[in-house]
Image (cartoon, rainbow, N blue to C red):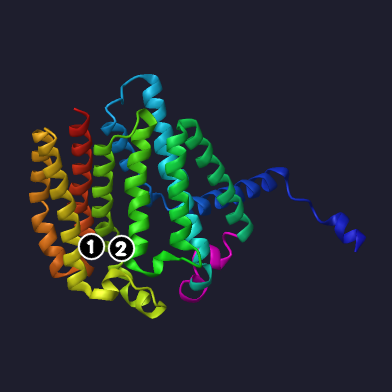
Amino acid sequence: MDQLRRDTPALPASTSTAAQSVGWRSVLGNTLTLMKPYTWFAPTWAFLCGAVASGMLAWSLESVGLLLLGLFMAGPVLCGLSQVVNDYCDMEVDAINEPYRLIPSGRVTLRQVQIITVVLTWIGSSIALFLGSTVALFVAIGLFCNLAYSMNPIRAKRNGWYGNALVAISYEGLAWLAGHATFSSVTWQSALLALLYSIGAHGIMTVNDFKSMHGDSQMGIRSIPVQYGKQRAAQMVVATMALAQLAVIGLLFWWGHPIAASVIGVLLLAQIVPNMRFIRDPEHNAVFFNGTAIALFVWGMLAAAIGLAS
C-alpha cells in the first residue's frame, strides 16, 4: 500500500487551483440564482422614483453616488435577501414538489444559506444606516414584511390578499420612501403616491399567481386566482392598477402638475388593449401583459415622480 501511494502521481497544483476556481464559480453562480436578479427591478425602480420625487437629485458626484448605493441596497441586497429567505422557508414544500431546486437538491447547503442571509442583512443594514435613520427605519419595516411573508407562524404568502400586500408595500412603497428619504425629508404628497403605487402593485403581484394556480390549490395557498377564478382575478388585477393610476392622475391635477397627470393618462389609455387581452386569457397573456401594461404602469411612476419634483 505504501508503494502504491508513492507511485500514485499527485495532482498538479494548476489542476487543484482550477478545481477550486470552478468550485467557487459554482457557489457564486448558485448564490446569484438563489437571489433571483430578475426580481430586483421593482424595488430599484421604486427607489429611483422616490429619489426623483424628492426634487433634490442632482448630477453631482455625491448625489449620483448616493443614488447608486441606494439602488444597490434596494435591489441586489435587500430584494436578493428576501428571495433567499423565501426559498429557505419553502424548503420542505420544495423538497416534495420541486426537489431539483437549489436548496432541496443540496446544491446550496443550509450553511451557505445562513452565511448568505447574514452577509446580505449586514450589508443592507449598514448601507441603510449610512443613508440615514429614516431610511434605516423603512428598511427595518421591509425586513419585517419579508419575514412575515415567508416564515411561520404568520406566513402571509398563504393568502393572496395579505401576502401580495406585504410584497407590494416592500417593493414599491417602502422602496419609494427610502429613495425620497435618502435626499430629503419625506413629504405627505410623496408618501401618498407611494401608497397608491403600492396598491397598484398589489394587482401586479397577482399576475405571477396565474401560472401556479393548480399547485397553489393543492398546497392550500389561497392566491387571488385560486379564491376567485382566472377571469374575475384578472379583472381585479386590471381594476386595481387602473384605479391607483386614476387616483394619481387626479392628485397631480389637484396639486398643479397637469403635464405629469396627462402623461400618466396617456399611458393608462395605452393599457386598454393589453388589459382586454389579459382579461380574456390571463394565463396565456401574462407575459404580454408584463411587457406592455405593467411596463406602462412603471413608466407612469417615473412621470409622477418628475411631476411632483417640478
Contact check, label 1 and label 2, Cβ < 8 Å: yes
Q: Which mark is residue 286?
A: 1
Residue 262 in the image, given as x and y percentages of width and height: 8, 39
Measure the C-alpha gap from mark 1 to mark 2: 8 Å
Task: Report the span colored magenta.
Answer: 94-109
**Residue, x 18% and y 51% (percent of image)?**
244
Residue 98 colored in magenta in the image: yes
**Residue, x 32% and y 47% (percent of image)?**
172
Q: Residues within 10 Å of mark 1 (few under 14, many from 20)?
A: many
| Of pointers 1 and 2, the one earlier in the residue sequence | 2
Residue 85 in the image, given as x and y percentages of width and height: 50, 57
Most distant residue in the front direction: 188
Would you say 63 lies left or right of 95 here? left
Secondary element type, mark 2: loop
The quadrant the N terminus occupies is bottom right
Residue kind at label 1, given as amino acid type: Ala
Looking at the image, can residue 299 be seen?
Answer: yes
Most distant residue in the right direction: 2
**Residue, x 46% and y 60% (percent of image)?**
148
Report the mark closest to the observer, 1 or 2.
2
Q: Which mark is residue 208?
A: 2
| Picture mark count | 2
Would you say 288 lies left or right of 115 here? left
Q: Residues within 10 Å of mark 2 (few under 14, many from 20)?
A: some
Would you say 155 lies left or right of 205 here? right
